[in-house]
Amino acid sequence: MCGGRMTVTSITLRRARAGAFPTIVAVVAVGLAPSPVAALPTSSPRFDHLAASSTDARISFLLPGRMASSRLGGAAGSVLAVEVRDAATHRLVFSRGGTRGLRGASTAKLFTSAVALQTMGGDHRLVTWVRLGPISGTDGIRSATVSLVAGGDPLLASSDLDTLAQRTVAALRSRGISKVSVTIDDTLFAPPTRPSGWPDSYGLDVVRPVRALVRDGRLLTDVSTDAGRYFTARVAARGALGGPTVRASYGGRLHLSPARPTLAATTGHTVEQSVRQMLLESDNQIAEMLFRLSALATGRSATWTGAQKTAMKVLGHLGVPLAGVRIIDGSGASRDSRLTARALTIVLERAVDVRANPALAPLYVGRAMPVAARSGTLAERFATTPSSCAAGKIVAKTGALHDVQALSGVTTGTDGHLKAFAILLENPPLDRYSVSAVRVAIDGLAATITGCW
């Protein structure tokens, strides 16, 4: 995260007087420069029968007028949906079009994150390993085939492959192998296809064929082959140093039996690390890989259909209302995907309630989402009045397509309660206003929910 990860140190619940409802008192939080981020409780207590606060009444009073701005839903053809929920009381604070299915663009990554964390767990490591095939030849020249087996690690780096090559060469030498054909096995995922709603106009900088083996998030059609060739070169380089020579050549794709011995493996990045990187930078490739990995974790195939069914099933089990929701991909890039503001706010409400949903803790307590004016895709948002008052006080996921602007996240209201919100805007009037002007207006709505404007 830009500026460092926040450390939450404490939370206190206090009653002001007999019969008064508990309120969340300041939480000490440090580590996000240049200025501290607002207090973030480590969980959202359950108070199911609280009356609506004056804070909520103010939000409900101010939002309609500010939503009527011509930069938002006031233009012909524009559709604006806004929903706000009090995450402490589980009360609906405000809703306008909250159940309408709309394109939410990358806010869909909140769904992908929740599903991945729920199915695999944030601590699960995505390991890449090297499998040894049959050995042939005499003691003088022993040769073998090895396979670089994809584990679906979206954060796999060239440095990881270099370390893996070093371990592989050491293992080959210990077996007296001096010649090796390096192959790749990316069969963890089904062969890549395009889902519905990915237009041909999407370039590799938007989406690319989804494969289980990639290094450095490279923008290539066949990232698996790229990783395999790089790994082969590193094995050859390592094999020429510090001991008996090991020659290596690239041998294409090959699936070896899982029963074959493992020569070496990476430590692997965790699901939580992958979720954080995906949300901070809105990385579509990470999203699509997590989408498939979630399917595998539930026993389904790593296909579009398998991942779609998994996402809907897991979200349903979390109590997310799915009427109006259509999940096509993990990134939200599909133009056929539909989200609702209500579904997004319920997912966030579940995420902040870490007592009931500990697997989702990385989303909020783990600070996976960008922070307003501080990090990720929000680093340059909330920079001007009136929304600048909310800088550092909101964590949220952005969403953008050429005809969509969206924002969904969590903030703390003036009553001390966490507020989950979603703002979805289809067809903003970009013939009259710039994208930045539309985003400033959306940020103003979020600042209204925070209560500083």
Image: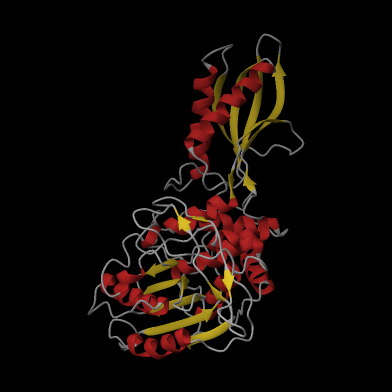
What is the image's colouring?
A: secondary structure
Q: Residue furthest right?
A: 259
Left or right: where does residue 218 sit relative to residue 70? right
User: Is 364 left or right of 255, judged from the image as shown?
Assistant: left
- In the depicted view, which residue is nearer to us: 252 or 84? 84
Instruction: Tell me what residue is drawn at x 61 percent, y 83 percent.
Output: 18
Q: Quadrant of residue 89?
A: bottom right
In this view, 334 is above or below 276 = below
Using the image as rendered, state which of residue 44 and residue 381 is in the foreground: 44
| Residue 371 on image: x %, y % | 41, 62
Q: Is any atom of residue 99 visible in this view?
A: no
* Quarter of the image that includes the C terminus: bottom left
Residue 325 x/y as whole percent: 56, 77
Q: Along the line of sight, which residue is nearer the eye, 202 or 119?
A: 119
Residue shown at the point (49%, 73%) measured from the top left: 336
Label total for image: 0
Give x and y (percent) for residue 75. 30, 87
Q: Is residue 56 above or below residue 159?
A: below
Q: Residue at x 61, y 57 (%)?
A: 292
Q: Is residue 48 above or below residue 139?
A: below
Q: Residue furthest top?
A: 140
Camera-nearest residue between 174 and 97: 97
Residue 138 lies, with reference to residue 162, above or below; the image says above
Question: Residue reaching furthest front?
Answer: 17
